[in-house]
Amino acid sequence: MHKTLSIIVPCFNEEESIPLFYEAMEDVKKNLPYQFEYIFINDGSKDNSLETIKNLRKQNEAIRYISFSRNFGKEAAIYAGLQNSTGELVTLMDVDLQDPPELLPKMIELLTSKSIDCVGTRRSDRKGEPPIRSFFARQFYKIINKISDTEMVDGARDFRLMTRQMVNAILELSEYNRFSKGIFSWVGFETEYISFENRERQVGETSWSFWKLLDYSINGIVNFSEAPLNIASLIGALSCLFSGIALIFIIIRTIIFGDPTSGWPSMVSIFLFVGGMQLLSLGIIGKYLGKIFTETKKRPIYIVKETEKDK
């Protein structure tokens, strides 16, 4: 009896990409001794993504789907897919075919031939990506790997093949504020990476704007590092130190030379600088407090509106 490979596919407004993805995966399936279990996650799409998935299910009952009540984000979709997967092996893939389906056989061979728990993929280049996005992406990985104990691979994709043991470990981390790239590394387990050249989307447009990616990166830093809090504390300590030294200097100067009239521009500049540092520190602390607030409310990571079992 063939083993089952669960394929988790988050979808948000991807009605054009879904049929192309399915065809590509079925071609790959012909050369693999695995039964495919497709789990499409409709993340509150506004187009006909759900209807497209339902039409495919009429052709193949191995296609399952989970439709959210609204858009909860890719992280929630990944978690939902992992929760509902049943295969001995589980893979995450983007439906836009930027994750090459033809790599799956090589990933399966590598995972099964070695004593490892995960085969990940990473882009060897960023061709076709806007230069400013590439620059900030590289800087993010440099920063996060310096300030966090959880190592993250530059260019790593969510596209990875995992054992059931690793998936179960990931599901134990039921936090609301999720950053999967960090979670995959944090749970441990031996992982090897396969590199491939960057691919552009086949059809449609990405829903990830520069600002969404920037916010996602900030969340990753907050979720896996306390360095920003340490920086805020250091700023406060240095401000106290320098203001104390300045106060002593002013007192000594006044005793020796009298009390000369100081210029107001320099005073205003100092006040604005110190005030800016205080606001920056409060903003950093507030970011962490906001994360704590959302965690303590214990809201569900996602809400299901419909699945294939409802039909």
Image (tube, helix red, strand yellow):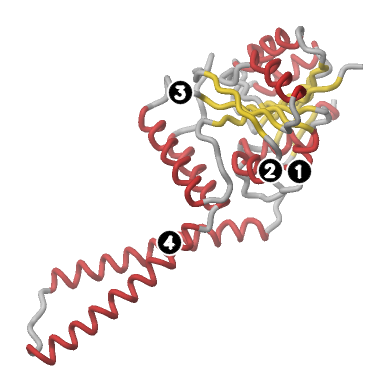
* 114 and 132: which is toward the camera: 114
Which residue is label 4 attached to?
Answer: 231
Which residue is label 3 attached to?
Answer: 125
* 300 and 96: which is toward the camera: 96
Q: Which of marks 3 and 4 is nearer the N terminus?
A: 3
Residue 214 visible, this orientation: yes
Instruction: Determine contact: label 3, label 2, CB under 8 Å.
Output: no
Which residue is label 1 attached to?
Answer: 169
The label shown at residue 188 is: 2
Within 10 Å of disc 1 (Cα), the crowding (few <14, some 14-19, many 20+) is some
* 61 and 226: which is toward the camera: 226
Q: What residue type is labelled 2?
A: Gly
Residue 237 % position (x, y): 38, 72
**Quadrant for the N terminus in the image:** top right
Q: Earlier in the sequence, mark 1 or mark 4?
A: 1
Residue 271 % position (x, y): 25, 70
| Alpha carbon separation for disc pair 2 and 4 | 28 Å
Q: Which amino acid does label 3 sit on?
A: Asp
For discs 1 and 2, the disc positioned in front in the rendered view: 2
The label shown at residue 282 is: none
Q: Earlier in the sequence, mark 2 or mark 4?
A: 2
| Alpha carbon separation for disc pair 3 and 4 | 32 Å
Instruction: Determine contact: label 1, label 2, CB under 8 Å.
Output: yes
Residue at 55% across, 27% down: 122
Residue at 19% across, 70% down: 268
Residue at 79% across, 30% down: 307
Instruction: Tell me the SS state at disc 1.
Output: helix
Q: What residue type is labelled 4?
A: Ile
